[in-house]
Every structure is written in structure tokens, then in C-alpha cells.
Image (spheres, rainbow, N blue to C red):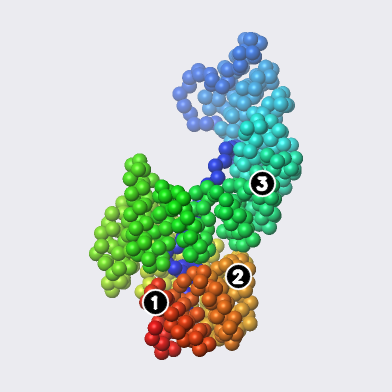
Amino acid sequence: MDYYGPMEPSHRFRSAAFLCALCAAAAPSLAAPAAPPPPPARAKQVELQAETIPSSESRAALDAELFYDILVGELSTSSGDPGSGYALILEAARRSGDGQLYRRATDIALQSRSGEYALAAARAWKEAQPQSREANRYVLQILIALNRIQETGDLLKQELAQSPAQDKLLTLQAIPQLYGRASDKAAAAGIVEKALADQLQNPAAGPVAWTTIGRMRFAAGDRKGALEAARQAQAQEAPLDSAALLALQLLEAGEAQAEPLVTRYMAGKPQPQIRMAYAGVLLNLQRFAEAGAQLDTLTREAPDMAEAWLLKASLALQSDRLPEAEASLDQFERLLQSYPPGDPRKAAMNQAYLLRAQIAEKRGDLAQAESWLAKVDNASELLAAQARRASLLARQGKLQEAVGVIRRLPARNAQEERLKLVAEAQLLRDAKQYKQAFEVQGKAVALAPDDYDLVYDQAMLAEKAGDLDAMERLLRQIIEKRPDYQHAYNALGYSFAERGIRLPEARQLIAKALEFAPKDPFITDSLGWVEFRMGNHAEAARLLGEAFQRQPDPEIAAHLGEVLWTLGEREKALEVWRTGLRLNKDNDTLQETLKRLKANP
């Protein structure tokens, strides 16, 4: 039995990237206080930086000595002595009070990666010109880069106060990016929340301010606090795009209570990109039927959105609806014709070629599948194409040759080596060489022991190889280190139920998984199955019927049909099994169930 975790089904979905454009950048990474190191030697030439020359108002006050200091400071900097250049330019700034000179001194220190010197110059600038928004920004960004977060509250308040009314919302939205490099995320969230206190009741800025606070809390790992902030944002006015994106992040992270915020937003007039992101999250949560409904709506409302057709094709392929997958790919490729030639268009076409190869493979046309794979010419898709080629060879009984194809692929770094190992393990798994696949997967896990998707897949291979102790050990390891990883609870609970052992614990484990993913049809299927094993047939039928309605699937069909068969509802059982066979007539669980019960749908 497969447990519908990361390895199952073999075509993995990832959610669409969140599309939130931000408008500010943090200061560059800064080293600890030190004398500015000399830059690389270059030709010595007298060239005043344009930004060094003071403004016209200040220039009139310059005397010959001040101008000489600026000139020598620039010469020193360009000649490999930024320390002397910094000192001379900063002294000139202090004598003239010119903001451009303060900025130049700060920039010299920043370019030399001397954080404390940069901070000293920026603070001198702010002291000389306390109302300068640019000086305030420099000090703020440098303090954040130096991880001196506690000193930034008043500076952030001033930045907000000085932001023009038309830019206020953009400034608020940019704050999480500004604090993105802070090492103490919780401290950053607290400082930002205090600084934004005056904005929260502002009818115009309040919703965006709450969303910003939510994003800061989310970055700090405070999901409950982020959820409350998203609710506050929606309570103040019609659902915001930014609040919906925050809710999507929370939903993807396992915060099921964020979904009502998403559905409320979707009930209005959502941006197509956000509907696309929601479909991606649903796919990642393996709620395929709901993802398909979102994609159907999206392709009606935004028929020119090419990526939606590609995702729709992937989903149709996943469900073995091959004509629908081909039709969606046809539309995707038609839309690509309007794209300008270049790497993005080529990469998109390579994705289409890979999907067409899978369609041909599912139909048993291995020659056609190979011809599609031959069209893939992008280095980033090489591994995927070669993995499909290896799969074709394995299906022809050439397993060792297939493994050789994967092993001969170059790996430029540890990540690519890990991907090769995962591809080899999948190949061996498909060939039912479970013990070898388990060993290869273990090598991939050794390269990334904190990648719990990899550990989960290793546990599933242990079960296939008959090593149930190893499976339980790996799943409990995940639960201990990643307590919100619902697949581990579900797989362990189902394993107990399938073997008819420790059934109360099995129910408890699966119920825990449902806390993290309440609408997951496959986890609901597991709960229905454990209820059946415990003799609660009516409750099992209810749960399995709910799961099958939400996600028609051959394994859920196998379970639901068996429960109905046991209850004496033979015709209903046969109809459910017929549906399951239409979805995938070769499904092992369904075929084993029919054989054991001597049923002939």
C-alpha cells in the first residue's frame, strides 16, 4: 500500500511561487569592525566621483583646503587606501554639512565591507541632518545588516512618517524584505509590530500593516500570530491580495484554519496569479479534485495564462486523463507562440516535451516517448529527460542499462548528486527492486539528512522491502524532528491498520495527521480503513465515501468497495470498483482486493 506522501504519486507537484513585488532592498552584508581593506589595485587616475561633488548651495562655501581634502580622499580610495579616503571624505562632510559627502563616506566603508565605519558615517550624517530621509534609511539598513535590530524601532517609525502618502502602502509592504536578513526573526517581528502600532487603526494603511505584521510573524515561526494578523487584515476591508498570499503561505505550511481566508478572497474577484498559487497549494496538499476545479475556473477567466494550461495538463496526466492532458498541452503550446524567443520559452517547451513523453509512455508507445525526450535541449531539464529515458529502458527489461544512464549523468554539486540518487531509487522502485532502492535512497538521505521528504520516501521503501522496523524507526524520527509532518503520522497509522495491530494507536496517529490536513482525502481514507479494521463499518463507509467524493482514486475505491461489499451493498461496491478500474486498471491494491473477494465488476 502506498501512503500518498512525497514519493506517491511519482509526478510531484509544487505550489506556484508567491507573487508579491516588494520595493526596497536591505543593505549589503557587512563585516565586523575593521580598518577598510585595500581594494584590488587599479590604474591611478584623478577622477572625482560625481556623487562626491557637493550641491551647488554648498559648493559656494567650499574653500581650497576642503576641495583639496575631497580630491585627496578620492585619490586615496582609488589608489587602494580606502581607510584614508574614508577619513578625508567624512571630515569634509562634517566641515561642509553636505549630505552627498556623508553618503560618499558611508559608501566607501560599505564597499570595503566595514560595517562599523559605515554606521559611524551614516550616524554622523543623520546627526547633521536629522530630517534627512536618506540618512535615516542608511542608518536603518546598516543596523539591520549588522543584526542590531533592537536599535531600529525609531528609525523605522521615521521612515514611515516621512514616506509620501502615495508610497505609504509600498513602504509597509517592503518592511519584511528589509528585515529579511535579520538573524533574530522574533526580535525583528516585535520591533516592526511596535513601529506599526499607529498604523493599525488607519483605515487606509491598517490592512496592509496587519499583513506586514503577519509576514514578520510567519518568518519568525509564529504561525498562529500570523493567522491572527491575516484575519485582522481581512476584517478591516474587502480581502486584500497580500493578505490572501499570507493565508496561502500559512495553508501550505499546514495551518488549516487559514483556508477560510483564502476561500473568502476567492469568492470575490481574485487576481489570476493568486488563483494559480492556490491551485498549486492544493496540488501540493494532494487535493487534486479541488485543484482541478480552480484550474478550470482559471483557464475560463484567464484563458491566455499559459502556465495554467501546463499545470492543468500535469494534473490530467496524473489522473490518467490522457486526451485532456494533450488538449491542455496543445493550448499551452499555442499560447507560447506569442512569447519572444529565448530561454524562458525554451524552458517552457521542454516541460511540454517531458509531459508528452509521459503521455506516450502511459500509452505504451515507447518509441514516441523517446522522440519527445530527444527534443529536450535545456541543461536544467537534462536529468528529468534522462530519468524518463532510463524508465523507458527499464520497461523494456534493460534495468542495468537504465541505471547506467542515471549514473553516467554529470553532477556539478551535491544537490545534483542527490537528485541523481533519487532518480535511481525511483527507477529501482518502479522495477520492484525495493531493497536496492532503499539502499540508494539512504545515500541520498545521507547527503541531506534534514530533508524529511527524502527520509519519508526511504521509510516507504523500507516498507516495500519488508523491513517494517526500519520503516517505523524512520517515521518516528520524522515525527520527533518535524512534528507537523502529517504524512509520517498517516503512514505509520495506516501500516498498523493494514496489519491489524495497535489499532487504537493507529487511529490516534491518523487523527493527528488530519489535524494538520483536515480535508486531505487520502488521510481520510486511512481513517476510514482503520475504522473498518476496528469493526465500525458504518463510520468507515461514511469516511471512505467522503474521501472518494473528494478525490476519485483507485486505492480509495478499493477500500470503499470492500466496506460496501461487507455491508451487503454489492451493487454499490461493484460500481465503485468499476470507477476505480477506469481510473487505473493496474492498481495493485484494487486488483488484490478484487482477487481476494472474488469480485468481478
Q: Is residue 68 left or right of residue 436?
A: right
* Dot in front, 2 or 1: 1
Q: Which residue is under mark 3?
A: 237
Identify the residue at horizontal 44%, vertical 68% (top origin): 9
- Residue 407 seen in render: no
What residue is at 49 percent from the left and 53 percent from the top?
A: 276
Q: Secondary structure at mark 3?
A: loop
Q: CA distance from mark 3 to mark 1?
A: 49 Å
Residue 502: where, in percent of width, then height? 60, 84
The numbered mark at residue 514 is: 2
Query: Which residue matches tag 1?
Result: 581
On the image, the x and y values in percent for residue 190 come to 72, 47
Distance between the alpha carbons at the discs numbered 2 and 1: 27 Å
Kindly state the secondary structure of the residue where label 2 is placed: helix
Which comes before the other along the chain, label 2 or label 1? Answer: 2
**Quadrant of image for the C terminus:** bottom left
Determine the image quadrant of residue 191: top right
Q: Amino acid at mark 1?
A: Leu
**Quarter where residue 505 is shown:** bottom right
Q: Is residue 140 visible?
A: yes
Disc 3 to disc 1: CB gap under 8 Å: no
Tell us which disc is closer to us: 3 or 2. 3
Among numbered discs 3 and 2, the one appearing first in the sequence = 3
- Marks 3 and 2 sit apart, C-alpha to C-alpha, by 32 Å
Residue type highlighted by circle 3: Glu
Under mark 2, the amino acid is: Leu
Q: Residue placed at 66% from the left, 46% from the top? A: 237
Q: Is 124 rendered above or below residue 365?
A: above
Residue 418 position, x and y percent, is: 44, 61
How would you rate the neighbour count of disc 3 (Cα within 10 Å): few for under 14, some for 14-19, many for 20 or more? few
